Image: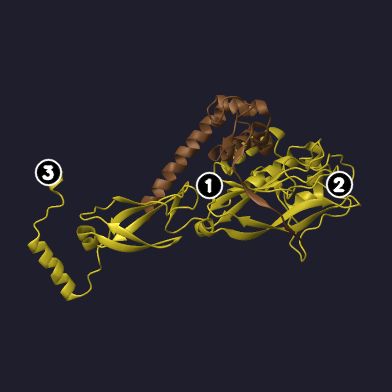
Chain colours: A yellow, B brown
Amino acid sequence: MEFKDYYKALGVKRDATADEIKRAFRKAARKYHPDINTSADAEAKFKDVNEAYEVLSDPEKRAAYDQLGAEPPRGAGGYQPPPGWDSGFAFSEGGPGPEGAFSDFFETLFRRGGAAGGHRASGRGADSHAQLMIDIEDAYRGAARTLTMRSPVVGPDGAVTLQERSVSVSVPKGIMQGQHIRLAGQGASSFGGGPAGDLFLEVSFAPHPIYRPEGKDLHLDLPVAPWEAVLGGHVVMPTPGGKVDLRIPESARTGQKLRLKGKGLPGTPAGDIYATLKIVNPKVTTEEARAFFEEMAKVMPFDPRAHLGG
Amino acid sequence: MKKATRRSDIVDALSLPDLCRFCEADEAWVIELVEHGVLEPHGSTAQTWRFRGANIVRAKKARRLNRDLGINTAGVALVLELLEERDRFLRRLARYEAI
């Protein structure tokens, strides 16, 4: 288990007042909220900030935490709290939000045997939510994934342990970014003997070097040679669904958009692929090629800047 | 580790009670989101409303912003609009930077 410096997480001094802690938390929560901040580590930072505030905003929890002192020197086996560290403090155990949302450090120190969050009066277990990142290619073919879910379980002695379980997910063909997959009965188990909640997975696509997804459509830039753009003709273009033959019209320009109907993400109807043409010059490495361009300059009177006037 | 294989399906459309359960929100709050134009369900009455696709993700985001940052409905509506605008610009920017 890793020691968590909650004061550092909020960027406040150890003797900060309750108001200072609240201000620091609100500012950090806005900054790192994963719906606002798109950087990769925002979610982890947001979690740290929330966990720190959960402890430091509660006078009893804060006092118990302060009792632990600063981070001890690192030893083998990670951090262990000294025995009896919380004696004399009467904080209510447990925290808000889904179980497992906080670190092992928090779970061990502050959630032992406490009432689990999200417990429903009807006896039904709480739903769980998670993210699932897949490749665009997976959405074309469908895919199978195995997720490892961790959830705290209260043992007979009241101690909380994090139990791991693996969940198999079949990702249906044609799924879009932002859609949810429901796994019935894979959420939190019920404490009253009722049915378990459901697990919802929000699907997102891993950034792709070529394709930009928009709903069921895919966009890409398609490089073409100057002669392909001028003369037109057929080019072979790879797509996640396989190679396709694409007709370039005569006198095509850079930025021109060509649509490949039904070649986007599968479905009824299937999405389209939009290829934006980009004319790319060949690298001139030989004398012969250079002479060829010089010849073009001579043969073709062309002023690409004519429309600029002057 | 316990191995589990169960059925999985795509969440296509949710009724008002289903969306409330999904977002852990009450009906009054979801109705307020509809009144602010944040959510646009199909169907004419709250009993027949069906929330689909992007509306489900928006509701979830709205709930998180409300719960985590204490933003009220009008504020959530504005933040979501600005975030969507920003995401559009970031996508366009990414295109030009790639060229």
- Kind of residue indicated by mark 1: Thr
Query: In the image shown, does B25 or A244 lie closer to the viewer?
Result: A244
Distance, label 1 to label 2, CA atoms, is 35 Å
x and y percentages locating residue B82 in the rendered image: 48, 35
| Residue A117, image quadrant | top right
Q: Residues within 10 Å of mark 2 (few under 14, many from 20)?
A: some
Distance, label 1 to label 3, CA atoms, is 44 Å
Query: In the image shown, does B46 or A309 lie closer to the viewer?
Result: B46
Q: Residues within 10 Å of mark 3 (few under 14, many from 20)?
A: few
Q: How many marks?
A: 3
**Do labels 1 and 3 touch, CB within 8 Å?**
no
Instruction: Give above or below for B88 relative to A228.
Output: above
Q: Earlier in the sequence, mark 1 or mark 3?
A: 1
Q: Residues within 10 Å of mark 1 (few under 14, many from 20)?
A: few
**Residue at coordinates 63% horizontally, 49% vertically from top-left?**
B9
- Kind of residue indicated by mark 2: Gly
Q: Would you name the residue on which mark 1 appears? A: A38
| Residue B40, image quadrant | top right
Determine whether the residue tagged by mark 1 lies in a helix, strand or loop. Answer: loop
Q: Would you name the residue on which mark 3 appears? A: A309
x and y percentages locating residue A246 in the rendered image: 32, 59
Determine whether the residue tagged by mark 2 lies in a helix, strand or loop. Answer: loop
Q: Would you name the residue on which mark 2 appears? A: A113
